[in-house]
Image: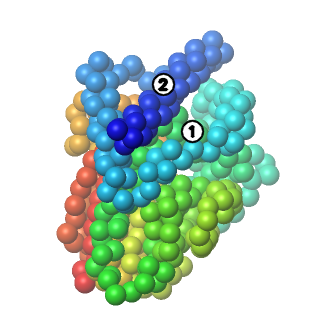
Amino acid sequence: MFNNLTKLTYQSFQQSKSYFSVGHKLLSTQLKNLLYPTVGQMKPASPEAIAKLQNRLNLLLEADWQDSQKGIYPESVLFDNSWADFFVNYPLLWLDLPQVWERITQGRYQDFSSTTDQEGYPSYYLQNFHHQTDGYLSESSANLYDLQVELLFGGAADPMRRRILAPLKRGLQKFQGISQKQIRILDVACGTGRTLKLMRSAMPEASLFGTDLSPAYLRKANQILSQNPGELPQLLQANAEELPYLDNYFHAVTSVFFFHELPAAVRQTVIEQCFRVTKPGGGFIICDSIQMSDSSELANMMDGFPKMFHEPYYKHYTTDDLVERLEKAGFEDIEIQIHFLSKYFIAYKPA
Ligand SMILES: C[S@@+](CC[C@H](N)C(=O)[O-])C[C@H]1O[C@@H](n2cnc3c(N)ncnc32)[C@H](O)[C@@H]1O
């Protein structure tokens, strides 16, 4: 009875996030049409696509609930939400929108303020991904990012990230005989640290590591992660093409919402780096967008997404054969899962 009530509360909590996102999209689209009528918009989804999306979302939330009941992570994680961040950043997000629309109107997609230090970053990185003001290179971008992702996915971003936790813990069972503290897990392109935060709640003792290219996002990750009890994950600024770790160092490596933002050749290099730093027998889990072969009903959405959200490498990603890439790097036993709008590649380095 009590359990049913908690499940209902969780479903309602997620439903309210989803309604809020729809409301936000409707309102911002109306304002955009008024102020910047030339800025394009996504073709409305067909009724079939909407029904399919709702069904996928329901399945995701059920899987999320079930994993909490299996003890993969505590139930409290399902309700984790930074209200303070929301109330501060939501008005800022609205204030940011006019300059975003202005840039789109003028076709400026590699636009950084004069104070942004662009030195040393790969050219493919210097983009206003999802029209983000200053790309990934400012504090305000880092402050708005989580909220923008939440609005994009209707509140389902963390439930999608959490789907890596069950296969992650399953893969780690191979390393019995060593203490939890000795287990080392790396999250590549950790951004603001959401996935590390979820890992910490599921594995309070494990040694967690995160790398990202953005100093601003790493500072935000540090701020978010230091609010949690337990040891702070070790964060390092690094290009995923040259991970600054020893060979065979990690029992598991993960990467969330990253590969679609890389040119094809870089995707291969990063996979090879992840292979190099994973211990024999260790797992590598990629969570990223679904691909064209996964859903014909959502093909229109995937077609429109890169243009609407400035994702220059997404189109290639949607038809890229990541299994082939993983195998080429040396991974084996590759399992694929799909949850809502995400696809998961769970691969192992031969023992
Ligand atoms: C879409 S965000 C995903 C962040 C995070 N994993 C999440 O779940 O929200 C992509 C992240 O990849 C980082 N990134 C992009 N290219 C990178 C590279 N070559 N090396 C390391 N990080 C990179 C960006 O700074 C950004 O934080």
Does the beta carbon at disc 2 come under 8 Å from ligand 1? no
Residue 232, disc: none
Residue beneath the point at 52% across and 39% down? 150
Nearer to me, 265 or 321: 321
Residue 166 is drawn in which quadrant?
Answer: bottom left
Q: Quadrant of residue 331?
A: bottom left
Residue at x 78% of width, y 48% of height: 114
Please say if 208 is above or below 153: below
Q: Which numbered dot is residue 148?
A: 1
Crowding near the residue tagged with mark 1, few <14, some 14–19, many ≥20 C-alpha atoms within 10 Å: some
Q: Secondary structure at mark 1?
A: helix
Q: CA distance from mark 1 to mark 2?
A: 15 Å
Say the numbered circle drawn on residue 19.
Answer: 2
Nearest the viewer among 38 and 70 is 70
Most distant residue in the left direction: 333
Closer-to-camera residue (267/248):
248
